[in-house]
Image (cartoon, grey):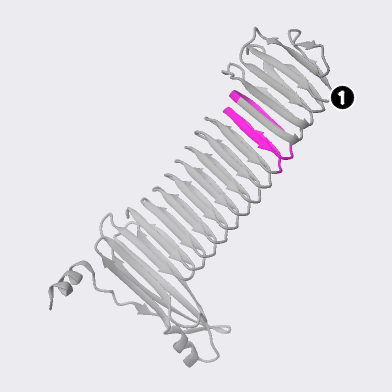
Amino acid sequence: MNSRCLIALAFVSTVWAAEESRLTRDGDFWVQTISGSETAAHGGRFRVTTSGPVTVRGGDDNQVQYSVTKRVKAKSEREARDLLRQFLVKAYRQGDMTFIAVAHGGEGRGSADLKITAPRSLRESVIETRGGTVDAVDLNGGLHVNTGGGAIRLDRINGTVTARTAGGEVTLGTMGGSVRCTSAGGPIRAEKIRGEAVLETAGGDIRAGEVGGELRASTAGGAIYITQAGAGVSVNSAGGAIDVGSARGMVRAESASGAIRIGAANGVQCDTGGGGIRLSNVTGALRASTSVGNVIAQLLAGGQPQDSVLITDLGDITVFVPSNLGIRILAQIDSGSGRIVSDFPGVKARTGNRQVAEGDVNGGGPLLRLSSDRGTIYIRRQK
């Protein structure tokens, strides 16, 4: 035996003998299951390649246990056995990497569902399928998922997660690290992400509950709903509403056509081509603009305002100013119609061709510009 063979034997474990179940009939289909196991390296890695659905569950022991359910449509048992033999299943270990591979050498007449129990202590897991749902739960290490078409469902993954599907819904439970998810067409749902998050889809809504770090989300067709973010938020929708409950950093939101609502933020930059804008308990620098729609802004009591601007081409603007917040206001209406209404006597109208009012509120401070092409501007004292 030459040295190359000795090195190969040192790093590649023997493939465990798999067990085949009895062939059974299920309507027009014939079904057979192959199961086996392979010892994983302590704190090692794990890789799956297949062409169908994959289910992975984290376990306590050091074995990677697998079960492949093969299903083919055939007129006879003999034909079914010939088709089933075209499925190839391999399980082996090379260094600290455990591999499970399911391949189909025939014409694609059939399917294979793969179910795996893997040590949750693995530092990294990779799941790749040419087309099918991926469902993974209870893994402590990083996880990388790629499917050529199918839903992705992940929960209780503590490491960094990257997930990509060529078409399907992405559902995330509790994620312990940072997450990057991409779908070529389908909604994205996330319950809790403790780290940073990037959520992108070419078509569908995006909903995220709690995100601990920075959040970026974009959809080419759908709405975006964020409950809470522990840092800054940047969201973009090509056609849908945007709703951010609260963020501890700046919120940047852009919609080609949809309303924007921001519950609380330390700085706002938002633009929509058509829809109202509502800002609540906001502070810092504010810039909000809509082509058609009303703008309503409630400034945070005790906040630290900066120079800001609120603009609507066609609609009203309403600003609520707390009694302990000092700012300077410059309000203007470009058309001949419309009016400016202020609860603060210090904001006074100026003479000229346009309707303009300017003055200090609560002693003055950073400048807040309010601009409407046609509409009414309300400057209200917050009670």
378 and 87: which is toward the camera: 378
Q: Quadrant of residue 36?
A: bottom left
Task: Look at 34% across and 74% down and name the residue there.
Answer: 90
Give x and y (percent) for residue 164.
Answer: 49, 57
Give x and y (percent) for residue 55.
Answer: 45, 63
Q: Quadrant of residue 35?
A: bottom left
Q: Element under label 1?
A: loop
Task: Look at 37% across and 50% down and name the residue there.
Answer: 140
Give x and y (percent) for residue 257.
Answer: 71, 43
Q: Spot the residue most to the front.
A: 353
Task: Look at 53% across and 42% down and name the residue there.
Answer: 216
The quarter of the image holding the N terminus is bottom left
Q: Quadrant of residue 33?
A: bottom left
The residue to which callout 1 is attached is: 337
Can I make out residue 25 in this image?
yes
Instruction: Tell me: 11 left or right of 139.
Output: left
Q: Is residue 205 above or below residue 251?
A: below
Residue 284 lies in magenta, yes or no? yes
Give x and y (percent) for residue 127.
Answer: 42, 62
Image: magenta residue range: 257-285
